[in-house]
Image (cartoon, rainbow, N blue to C red):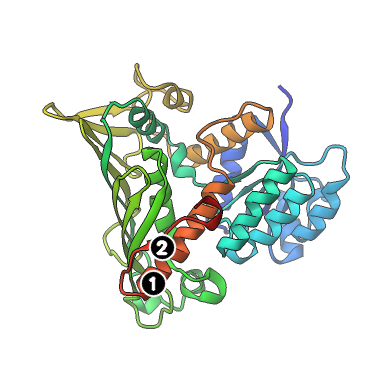
């Protein structure tokens, strides 16, 4: 099998997300790391790319140089990952899609709903893949949960409760740390802080497992550290198109919580629970029955969970391998085998619509607001 060529923009030395993408993209031999513009400092980016094994002529100073350099190559990259600051996602993603490249964009895909809808239209017009890195949806036991819901194994879903809450930004004395401050600065983060950063992962997960979309929501935002313009804590109620009731909490000031991403789905005949800190287990309780632990790698799993369980039972699989599962699905899609679980541009614009709806709702003391992008109403 010929390897696909992969390029990366952002995710340079010291980046939080860069190593996960490089480990994930290269884990299964689907991709070759062929090109990169890895840093906003051109010389630093070129140097780091070369140290990672990229050829001198494909170690670019910035994304515009990479676009110009790759556009007309016979061996141009098959996939470009955009892992730059949020405000740059739209411009870069749109430019590479229009030039005929497949793109994996970090979340949030855009800063506005209008930009998100434009990305959807560009992807449709070019016929290129635009995926969004909602990588938690690629854990094997999350895929198992979705398959169980689709198969009716817990009956019609009544209620979903999810949260993504940590305490790593809870120290007020560290509020001016540049690695923290930008997340609460509208000029860099957009209209929302914690909800746009972590909450949309939880909301996407609810839609993904329940196989349904959020129709409306009501939100309460709080900036618990006074110097922050944007929220560091948020609570949402939401309703899905199929009637499911949703509850979501997201926080960055919950001191004592480390990762804090989990989801519970309650149906007519059973319930499921998954937590990112114990990602190899799915907790299942049938109505009137005993609680069971379904383990990654065991027999009898649904096909998608089996396909993405890459090491034997009892051996842990972590975050970089969830990212790797996204790249596996991307490689299949590029080669023509579409994977149903791959998050796309439509997921990206739905998330951005929910962010703006939540901001509007919070500004109106929790009024209910339509959470759908106009193009999907």
Q: Which residue is mark 2?
A: 195
Locate residue 304: give its quadrant.
Answer: top left
Farthest front residue in view: 377
Instruction: State the mark number for residue 231.
Output: 1
Farthest top residue in view: 299
The residue that appears at 53% across and 70% down in the rendered structure is 190
Q: Position of residue 228 (x, y in %)?
A: 41, 79
The secondary element bearing badge 1 is classed as loop
- The answer to whether residue 1 is left or right of residue 278 is right
In-front residue for pair 2/218: 218
The residue that appears at 67% across and 27% down in the rendered structure is 336
Q: Are marks 1 and 2 in contact (CB under 8 Å)?
A: yes
139 to 112, vertically: above or below = above
Q: Position of residue 302 (x, y in %)?
A: 39, 22
Locate residue 250: give its quadrant.
Answer: bottom left
The residue that appears at 50% across and 35% down in the rendered structure is 341
Can you say which quadrant of the picture contains the N terminus?
A: top right
Does residue 12 show up? no
């Amino acid at each position: 099998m010929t390897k696909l060529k992969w390029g990366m923009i952002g995710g340079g030395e010291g980046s939080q997300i860069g190593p996960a993408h490089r480990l994930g993209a290269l884990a299964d031999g689907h991709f070759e790391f062929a090109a990169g513009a890895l840093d906003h400092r051109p010389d630093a980016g070129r140097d780091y790319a070369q140290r990672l094994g990229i050829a001198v002529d494909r170690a670019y100073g910035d994304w515009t140089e990479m676009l110009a350099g790759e556009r007309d190559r016979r061996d141009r990259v098959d996939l470009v990952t955009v892992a730059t600051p949020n405000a740059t996602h739209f411009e870069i993603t749109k430019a590479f899609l229009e030039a005929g490249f497949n793109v994996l964009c970090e979340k949030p895909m855009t800063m506005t709903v209008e930009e998100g809808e434009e990305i959807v239209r560009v992807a449709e017009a070019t016929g290129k893949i635009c995926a969004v890195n909602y990588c938690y949806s690629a854990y094997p036991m999350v895929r198992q949960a979705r398959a169980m819901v689709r198969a009716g194994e817990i009956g019609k879903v009544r209620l979903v409760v999810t949260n993504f809450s940590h305490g790593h930004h809870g120290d007020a004395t560290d509020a001016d740390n540049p690695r923290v401050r930008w997340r609460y600065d509208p000029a860099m983060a957009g209209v929302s802080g914690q909800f746009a950063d972590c909450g949309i992962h939880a909301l996407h997960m609810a839609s993904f497992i329940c196989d349904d979309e959020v129709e409306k929501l009501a939100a309460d935002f709080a900036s618990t550290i006074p110097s922050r313009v944007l929220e560091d804590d948020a609570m949402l109620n939401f309703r899905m198109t199929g009637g499911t009731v949703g509850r979501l909490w997201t926080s960055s000031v919950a001191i004592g919580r480390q990762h804090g991403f989990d989801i519970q789905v309650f149906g007519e005949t059973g319930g499921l629970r998954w937590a990112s800190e114990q990602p190899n287990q799915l907790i299942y309780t049938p109505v009137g029955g005993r609680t069971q632990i379904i383990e990654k790698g065991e027999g009898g799993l649904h096909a998608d969970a089996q396909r993405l369980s890459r090491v034997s039972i009892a051996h842990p699989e972590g975050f970089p391998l969830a990212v790797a599962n996204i790249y596996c699905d991307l490689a299949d899609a590029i080669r023509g085998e579409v994977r149903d679980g791959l998050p796309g541009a439509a997921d990206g614009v739905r998330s951005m619509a929910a962010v703006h709806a939540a901001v509007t709702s919070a500004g109106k003391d929790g009024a209910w607001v339509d959470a759908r992008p106009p193009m999907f109403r």
